[in-house]
Image (cartoon, rainbow, N blue to C red):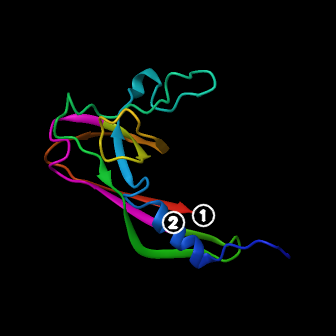
Amino acid sequence: MKSNQLIFTKGKEKALKTLFSQDNFGYLAIGYQDETQDTNGFENPVTDADDDGFNEINVQTFPSYARIPLVAQDEVNVDYDTETVYMKFTADLDIDNIIEITPINQFAIVDSSDSTDPNTVIYAAATFPEFVKSEKIAITFVIDIGL
């Protein structure tokens, strides 16, 4: 296939590393939505314009909560058939983060480390099976992102 525009795999790797740095949007926010009410998902922004469905842990209720930096891992995988570059990023929710006993089941990639910033932009979000977090448990999130 002939093309007049190319982004080489090394360029995609550099773009992923730059894009997901703490200078841009390299933070993971943790949230919870009640699964029993069938709300552990994200609202449709066309029909539910006032709610994006991500419900971040409230730092006033849980003062030990802090957003987590995403850290790029050295491992880079290239799918040469599709020219897609995949990188792994980790975020460590350590034992000192959310020491109160509370359920969690969502995360979002955001642009700010400040969970009280009203101008925070959410770039991506996902749900996971409900999990109870306390000071006795640490979790490492591994996120694989492709470009």
The quadrant holding residue 114 is top left
SS label for mark 1: loop
Percent across and percent down for residue 106 are 40, 40
The numbered mark at residue 130 is: none
Percent across and percent down for residue 122 are 46, 41
Q: Is residue 32 left or right of residue 122?
A: left
59 to 48, vertically: above or below: below
Q: Quadrant of the N terminus?
A: bottom right
Q: Quadrant of the C terminus?
A: bottom right
What range is drawn magenta here?
87-103
**Mark 1 touches mark 2? (CB < 8 Å):** yes
Residue nearest the observer in this picture, 23 or 72: 23
The numbered mark at residue 16 is: 2
The quadrant holding residue 65 is top left
* Residue at x-position 71% and y-position 74%: 81
Instruction: Kindly identify the amino acid type of the residue bearing the numbered disc 2.
Output: Leu
Q: CA distance from mark 1 to mark 2?
A: 7 Å
Q: Judge whether residue 110 is colored magenta.
A: no
Who comes first in sequence, dot 1 or dot 2?
2
SS label for mark 2: helix
Instruction: Kindly identify the amino acid type of the residue bearing the numbered disc 1.
Output: Leu
* Residue at x-position 65% and y-position 77%: 8
Percent across and percent down for residue 127 are 44, 41
The numbered mark at residue 147 is: 1
* Residue at x-position 35% and y-position 44%: 29
